Image: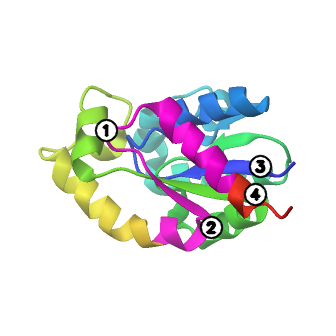
Amino acid sequence: MRNLILVGPMGAGKSTIGRLLAKELRLPFKDSDKEIEQRTGADIPWIFDVEGEQGFREREQAVIAELCDVDGMVLATGGGAVMRVENRVALRRGGHVVYLHASVEQQVDRTSRDRNRPLLRAVDPGKVLAELLAVRDPLYREIADVVVETDERPPRLVVQEILERLEALSPR
């Protein structure tokens, strides 16, 4: 069984939907950001503060490469994982990639109370999210086998659509 890899912006539902998919498929669930936190013993904002975004991205690249070499899991990635070409190559090689697309408005709504997102420490988080999506959306689409909209949709409905779309991709 290859991996099922979720990519997309902050607030798209990668962790929530990933956990539900893993349960449905009876597979382990991994979140690349949580893996980084567990391995370093520090949270993402602390890593950003101490090592900068560059330091965090180095750690992220190593974790993604390692996780993509294992088969049979559902993997949720951080929103910026696609920024490095090495990550995009590893993710494509690592399994079926599902891009969970969310509008900027939905992202703002879902992330507004989360203090664990260093890139959103801004006067206008909506502007930051729009700028990030403009750059990252083509990269998500470049590696995605399937694109699924998550706006205003219950996670279980999104999971069902992902399973149906992946089934259609599988050779009989």
Q: Position of residue 15 (x, y in %)?
A: 54, 34
In this view, the residue in front, 39 or 117, is 117
Q: Which quadrant: the C terminus?
A: bottom right
Q: Is residue 92 left or right of residue 108?
A: right
Looking at the image, which residue is at 58% across and 65% down? 144
Residue pointed to by mark 4: 95
Q: Is residue 121 left or right of residue 137?
A: left
Residue 33 shows in this picture: no
On residue 152, which mark appears?
A: 1
Residue type at tag 4? Gly
Residues tagged 4 and 3 counted as in contact (Cβ below 8 A) = yes
Mark 1 surroundings: few (<14), some (14-19) or many (≥20) residues within 10 A: few
Residue pointed to by mark 2: 88
Task: Give the alpha-carbon distance from disc 1 to disc 3, as whole Å.
Answer: 27 Å
Q: Is residue 102 left or right of residue 16?
A: left
Residue pointed to by mark 3: 3
Residue 28 shows in this picture: yes
Q: Position of residue 44 (x, y in %)?
A: 48, 36
Task: Give the alpha-carbon distance from disc 4 to disc 1, as whole Å.
Answer: 27 Å
Looking at the image, which residue is at 72% across and 62% down? 169
Q: Earlier in the sequence, mark 1 or mark 3?
A: 3
Looking at the image, which residue is at 31% across and 68% down? 134
Task: From this view, report whether residue 43 is shown above or below residue 101.
Answer: above
Total numbered circles: 4
Q: Nearer the viewer, mark 2 or mark 1?
A: 1
Task: From this view, report whether residue 92 is shown above or below residue 107.
Answer: below
Q: Earlier in the sequence, mark 4 or mark 3?
A: 3
Q: Nearer the viewer, mark 2 or mark 3?
A: 3
Residue 162 located within the stretch drawn in magenta: yes
Task: Give the alpha-carbon distance from disc 2 to disc 4, as whole Å.
Answer: 11 Å
